[in-house]
């Protein structure tokens, strides 16, 4: 039977899963893939809609009863955190400080995304007046047009936001790393309990990652076809930033980052109490 897989169309996901999706991983079953933004997969995973699924780490408290957290295939790293963007040149006369967001409308890519959870932790005590969940591709144009006072963005927006005349008010990755010393846990790969053996699934994904690194050109056309109008140079920078040593293995630092994120969020009353320890997650 085919395995149902849900990932984003972003270059890091298509690069990592190219071999698995195209039947190039020995011993892996055929795969039926769905491409969707992470806000969509977070919700679909709550319904048990997929066997393997990419979700936000921030969504784990609602999902770990039904899914295993796999120790590979996801997105963690350093220097790759979400940005809060505003209009203006960024000088002291036009750039709002952190307190100014207390009266702002902020566009975010999903209410259970890691980006939004980091934003809530960062803005604790001085939250914005209003939050709007907006499709990712509409956030930067919306801020540039004045529909939103600020926007929370991820992924390739790190490389392209100046084209929209926007300024980075804060790099939440820098804030997180400076505060914790840990990498930023962004996206996780989950395997549905009772349907997918997590040990086998991790093996398939690691082999897919190995093949991606061994022959990057093999996935080139596939990655570009899903890259949503990204230039090849931006695609390459995107992959170089988000596909890293944590993609092959979370390791101690990766698991510590997940536990720190969910622990802080639980203490702040932002997510339900849950265990994100290795007792819950399968690891080799």
Image (cartoon, helix red, strand yellow):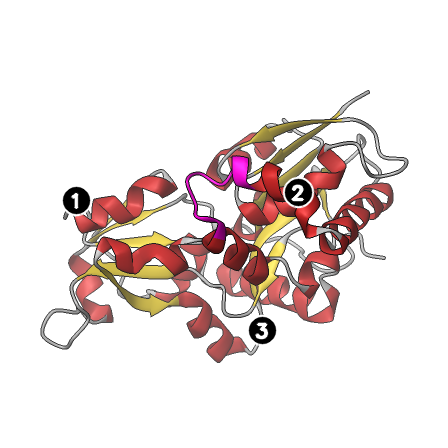
Count neighbours of disc 3 (C-alpha within 10 A) and say few if under 14, some if 14 to 19, many if 20 or more.
many
Which label belongs to residue 38? none
Residue on which disc 2 sits: 219
> Can you give x and y, in whole percent of width and height, for residue 244 in the image?
65, 62
Residue on which disc 1 sits: 147
> Can you give x and y, in whole percent of width and height, for residue 111 in the image?
41, 44
Residue closest to the far top:
1
Q: CA distance from mark 2 to mark 1?
A: 38 Å
Give the number of the mark in front: 2 or 3: 2
Q: For the magenta stretch, what is the residue range?
A: 224-232
Q: CA distance from mark 3 to mark 1?
A: 34 Å
Q: CA distance from mark 2 to mark 3?
A: 31 Å
Do the residues bearing badges 2 and 3 touch, measured as CB atoms within 8 Å? Answer: no
Task: Work out whether residue 270 can be spotted.
Answer: no
Q: Secondary structure at mark 2?
A: helix
> Can you give x and y, in whole percent of width and height, for residue 62 in the image?
58, 42
Task: Work out whether residue 188 can be spotted.
Answer: yes
Residue 101 falls inside the magenta stretch = no
Residue 226 falls inside the magenta stretch = yes
Q: Earlier in the sequence, mark 3 or mark 1?
A: 1
Would residue 275 appear left or right of 8 to someone viewing this image? Answer: right
> Can you give x and y, in whole percent of width and height, for residue 77 in the image?
58, 65
- Looking at the image, residue 175 lies above or below residue 13: below
């Amino acid at each position: 039977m085919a395995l149902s897989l849900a990932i984003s169309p972003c270059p890091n996901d298509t690069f990592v899963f190219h071999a698995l999706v195209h039947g190039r991983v020995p011993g892996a079953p055929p795969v039926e893939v769905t491409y969707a933004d992470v806000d969509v997969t977070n919700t679909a995973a709550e319904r048990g809609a997929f066997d393997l699924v990419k979700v936000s780490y921030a969504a784990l408290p609602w999902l770990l009863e039904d899914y295993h957290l796999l120790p590979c295939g996801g997105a963690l790293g350093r220097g790759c955190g979400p940005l809060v963007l505003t209009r203006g040149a960024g000088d002291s006369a036009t750039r709002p400080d952190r307190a100014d967001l207390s009266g702002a409308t902020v566009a975010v890519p999903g209410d259970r995304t890691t980006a939004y959870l980091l934003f809530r932790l960062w803005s604790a005590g001085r939250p914005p007046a209003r939050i709007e969940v907006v499709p990712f591709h509409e956030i930067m144009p919306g801020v540039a047009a004045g529909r939103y006072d600020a926007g929370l963005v991820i992924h390739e927006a790190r490389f392209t936001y100046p084209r929209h005349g926007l300024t980075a008010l804060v790099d939440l990755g820098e804030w997180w790393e400076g505060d914790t010393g840990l990498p930023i846990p962004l996206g996780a790969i989950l395997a549905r309990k009772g349907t997918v053996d997590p040990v086998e699934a991790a093996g398939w994904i690691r082999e897919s990652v190995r093949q991606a690194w061994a022959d990057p050109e093999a996935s080139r056309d596939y990655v570009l076809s899903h890259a949503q109008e990204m230039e090849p140079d931006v695609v390459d920078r995107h992959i170089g930033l988000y596909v890293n040593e944590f993609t092959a293995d979370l390791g101690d630092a990766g698991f510590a980052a997940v536990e720190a994120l969910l622990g802080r969020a639980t203490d702040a009353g932002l997510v339900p109490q849950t265990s994100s320890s290795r007792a819950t997650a399968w690891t080799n």
